Amino acid sequence: MDWISKNLPYLMAGISVGGQYALIAIGYTMVYGILRLINFAHGDIFMVAGLIMVYAVTVMPMPLAILLVIAATVALGFLVERAAYKPLRSAPRMSVMISAIGVSYLLQNLALYITGGLSQQYPAIPWLSATVTILGATTKRVTLVTPVLTVLLVVVLVLLIKYTKVGMAMRAASRDFETSQLMGIKINSVISMTFVIGSFLAAIGSMLYFTNYTGVTPTAGAMPGLKAFVAAVFGGIGSIPGAVIGAFIIGICENIIKGLGWTTFSDAFTFALLIVILIAKPTGLFGEKAIDKV
């Protein structure tokens, strides 16, 4: 019983963090699935969602602040796509990647200007921040809510992609971008919807993540964003179930390493895993091999 109460918090924290990484990783994998673009600004959109909450609760009640965070984050994702990516639709892929990096640094520097570089205390979301005890282990309720909410959101997203017109358009665009355009699919609308969904999930992920890690800095989205990217690559970038499974594996392994007392190496493990998976299986666990069109 002592062993369980000692190690259970690390396992629960790993599952929780994995769920938070998954919500970010889905944004990466959906955008890549259609545009073949790594949206390097995605982690910073996640960070901006945290800052919006910090300032929103000072002028409005928590329920309204939560709605504002979601709406503003979705609007930011939509704006980033329209301003930074849409004008480069026919440009070389390297140009789009440079634009993505530029947006990332722009958001970080805007946050630096607003906060003065100081860490901002994330407000406690009452129900999520409450503590609960399971088998002698005490943790925040958010630790239990995160994996359940993540799975529910993923199921809804998979159903949306599989059974709705927008979802079918997304699948068509991911299979063959040019042919989809010729068949009358409004590609710009599909891409915008992809960014909207990714930003919505990033907003939810930020509320769950910063409830546990309460300091919001201009670079707070960098490491979670990188780890979510690794999760997407590990699971097979372009595959939503793969990104989710990869995120949970990384979150659990990372926290087990911390539980063993090797906290210093927890981040190194994630990136070592990226190197191994790229060497052993470049397409990831569930990724499909690229087919050259003749």
Image (cartoon, grey):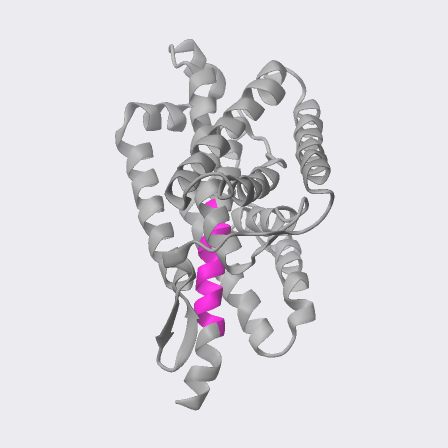
The total of numbered circles placed on residues is 0
Q: Nearer the viewer, residue 194 or 171?
A: 194
Taking the spot 47% from the left edge, 49% from the top edge, the residue there is 207
Taking the spot 72% from the left edge, 40% from the top edge, the residue there is 112
Q: Nearer the viewer, residue 88 or 55?
A: 55
Residue range in magenta is: 10-23
Corner quadrant of residue 254: bottom right
Q: Is residue 287 among what the camera can see? A: no
Q: Establish if 75 lies above or below 215.
A: above
Residue at the far front in the pictured view: 59
Q: Is residue 136 magenta?
A: no
Taking the spot 38% from the left edge, 11% from the top edge, the residue there is 183
Left or right, 54 with respect to 94, comes to left
| Percent of width and height locating residue 67 | 40, 37
Q: Is residue 229 among what the camera can see? A: yes
Q: Nearer the viewer, residue 26 or 90?
A: 26
| Percent of width and height locating residue 182 | 43, 10
Taking the spot 58% from the left edge, 39% from the top edge, the residue there is 48
Q: Establish if 136 lies above or below 290.
A: below
| Percent of width and height locating residue 171 | 39, 28
| Percent of width and height locating residue 73 | 50, 34
Quadrant of the snapshot with the C terminus:
top right
Magenta segment's dominant SS is helix
